[in-house]
Amino acid sequence: MTSPTKPAGPPPGPRAARRRLIRELLLVAGLFAVYKAGRTLSTGRTDEAYRNAGWIWDAERALHLPGEGAVQRLLLHGDALVHTANTYYAAVHFPATALFLVWLYVRRPAHYLWARRVLAVLTGAALVLHLTFPLAPPRMLGAAHLVDTGQVYGPSVYGAAPATDTMANQFAAMPSLHFGWALMLALGMIAATRSRWRALWLLHPLLTLLVIVGTANHYWLDSIVAAVLLGGALLLIPRPVAAARARTAAAVVVRRHVPSPKAPAAASAAAPAAPAGPAPAPVVAGAGR
């Protein structure tokens, strides 16, 4: 006799939903605060940051990567264009990522958990690299002959003196989280939606790449390293659909290895043989005459 199935509990009420939302907001804000605080630990390594910048510049030339100046020259054709690029760099990065997480939280909760975990792993790996490999951006490198478009045309998110900038660590160019977060946003929206036009989300990281290079805030290699770190995070944190398939496959394997209960023996084999009764009396010829 099987036990009755336990009915599912009632859905969480508004109070539980608010607690969950507050917990997620505090978690994301806490992770961001730890990241910002950790970045400041490498602000005093100016000489090392410039040496690493020279090494990165020479490595890009050895790899025959296109010069960052080619993109910047396109932006410098008009003040409005370069000002728009600076505004995109300063104003789109954090709000776009925040809106991405909020949308997933409301509309795709499973994808939200996946994206939040991937971004946390990516950002943590970036922080380790920022601390171990301080890097001056190309706008500070004399050999690059690039313009600091933020300071010249505005707006700028950095102070004029990098060594005394208390708001940001300007020697944390590699990897570029501008590009890494933008690429994760595009991949997350492609995974969470079913529109035939969802591939257009890739325009966001592409535009971000052109902006961060053209404004001389990042090298090409900064974005390449960010993409590699993101790839590692995506391999470590499976997508919700892939995780569900893995759980289903595991359940099937378990069911196959659980022995099934033995079938009851055949009725004919189980039933005892009927006892033999007395033999019928023989019929005698002529009886009753």
Image (tube, grey):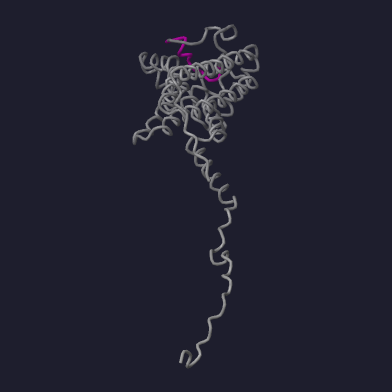
The vertical placement of 57 against 47, above or below, is below
- The part of the image, by quadrant, that contains residue 222 is top right
The residue depicted at 58 percent of the width and 56 percent of the height is: 262
The vertical placement of 78 against 70, above or below, is above
Q: Nearer the viewer, residue 38 or 12?
A: 12
Range of residues picked out in magenta: 141-153
Q: Residue furthest left?
A: 196
The residue depicted at 56 percent of the width and 7 percent of the height is: 161
What is the x, y in percent for residue 20? 49, 20
What is the x, y in percent for residue 255? 56, 48
Q: Nearer the viewer, residue 228 or 81?
A: 228
Q: Is 181 a magenta residue?
A: no
What is the x, y in percent for residue 212? 47, 21
Q: Nearer the viewer, residue 266 or 193?
A: 266
Q: Residue furthest front?
A: 289
Q: How many badges with numbers are in the image?
A: 0
Going by the image, does 100 lie left or right of 130? Answer: left
Q: Is 142 a magenta residue?
A: yes
Q: Nearer the viewer, residue 61 or 252?
A: 252
The residue depicted at 37 percent of the width and 17 percent of the height is: 81
